[in-house]
Image (spheres, rainbow, N blue to C red):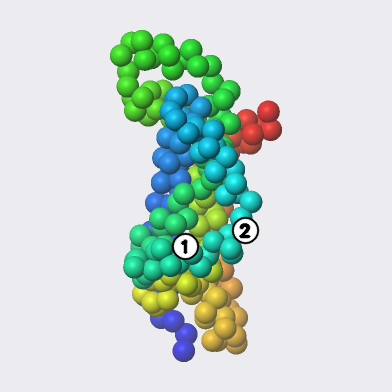
């Protein structure tokens, strides 16, 4: 039968509960990795860069099974839904490209004043990447919000279903319930529209940076 209103609210909550942390972790990981890759010296730097680039050539479907084997102990858990999708190679390269445009002297001056790399990263670098971070957040949030295959695989429990998964299963099981399903589809789309409208200024600035 059709799901009750509580199940729809829980699915909506689940979608937010996995999409927001995934986007935030992507920003933190991308920021730290991008900064380290460009402005820090360490052994194996070239190899790490090549490895990151190499991973971008693999389709997501190819990585689905090995990813599931590794993360299967976290099945039907928010961590299992968040962590595998929070490490975005695209996000890392976005921040790497940004830090290549920032003069090294800006960070060196802060180091001379006694600032540590973490202080430089979060008090100087991060505020300067506001527009880029908005682009990364919106892109990852939208991708995660619309995820279907991974959620159906790692979280088959009804209580862990995201809104996207629930709409998919309800359509298959109750194809005649067109009205409620269309309403649910609007509910699925509405948060993305609101987010874009709220951050449209930074989104446009980030797009202009990417086109430079």
Q: Residue at x 51, y 48 (%)?
A: 88
Front one among 193 and 155:
155
Lateral position of residue 12 relative to residue 90, left or right: left
Which one is in front, 78 or 75?
A: 75
Q: Is residue 93 visible?
A: yes
Label of residue 59 in the image = 2
Which of the two labelled residues, at mark 2 and mark 1, occupies the earlier sequence position? 2
Among the 4 quarters of the image, the one containing residue 74 = bottom left
Give how far across and how far down residue 129 sits, in percent. Answer: 49, 30
- Is residue 19 at all visible to an observer of this figure? no
Marks 2/1: CA distance? 13 Å
* Mark 1 secondary-structure assignment: helix
- Residue 199 in the image: state x and y as whole percent: 53, 41
Disc assigned to residue 24: none
Contact between marks 2 and 1 (CB within 8 A): the answer is no
Q: Residue 79, position in %: x, y?
A: 35, 60
What is the secondary structure assignment of the residue under circle 2? loop
* Residue at x 47% of width, y 39% of height: 30
* Number of other residues with Cα within 10 Å of mark 1, as a class: few under 14, some 14 to 19, many 20 or more: some
What quarter of the picture does the C terminus occupy?
top right
Q: Residue at x 46, y 89 (%)?
A: 1
Q: Does 85 sit above or below residue 160?
A: above
The residue where tag 1 is placed is 67
């Amino acid at each position: 039968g059709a799901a009750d209103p509580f199940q729809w609210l829980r699915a909506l909550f689940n979608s937010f509960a996995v999409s927001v942390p995934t986007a935030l972790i992507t920003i933190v990981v991308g920021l730290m990795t991008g900064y380290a890759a460009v402005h820090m010296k360490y052994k194996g730097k070239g190899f790490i860069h090549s490895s990151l680039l190499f991973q971008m050539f693999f389709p997501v479907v190819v990585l689905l099974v090995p990813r599931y084997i590794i993360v299967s102990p976290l099945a039907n858990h928010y961590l299992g839904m968040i962590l595998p999708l929070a490490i975005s190679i695209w996000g890392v390269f976005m921040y790497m490209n940004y830090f290549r445009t920032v003069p090294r002297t800006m960070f060196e001056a802060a180091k001379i004043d006694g600032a540590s790399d973490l202080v430089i990263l979060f008090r100087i670098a991060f505020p300067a990447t506001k527009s880029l971070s908005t682009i990364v957040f919106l892109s990852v949030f939208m991708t995660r919000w619309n995820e279907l295959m991974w959620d159906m695989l790692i979280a088959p429990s009804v209580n862990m279903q995201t809104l996207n998964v629930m709409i998919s299963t309800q359509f298959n099981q109750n194809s005649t319930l067109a009205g409620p399903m269309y309403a649910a589809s609007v509910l699925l789309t509405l948060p993305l529209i609101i987010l874009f409208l709220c951050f449209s200024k930074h989104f446009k600035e980030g797009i202009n940076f990417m086109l430079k």
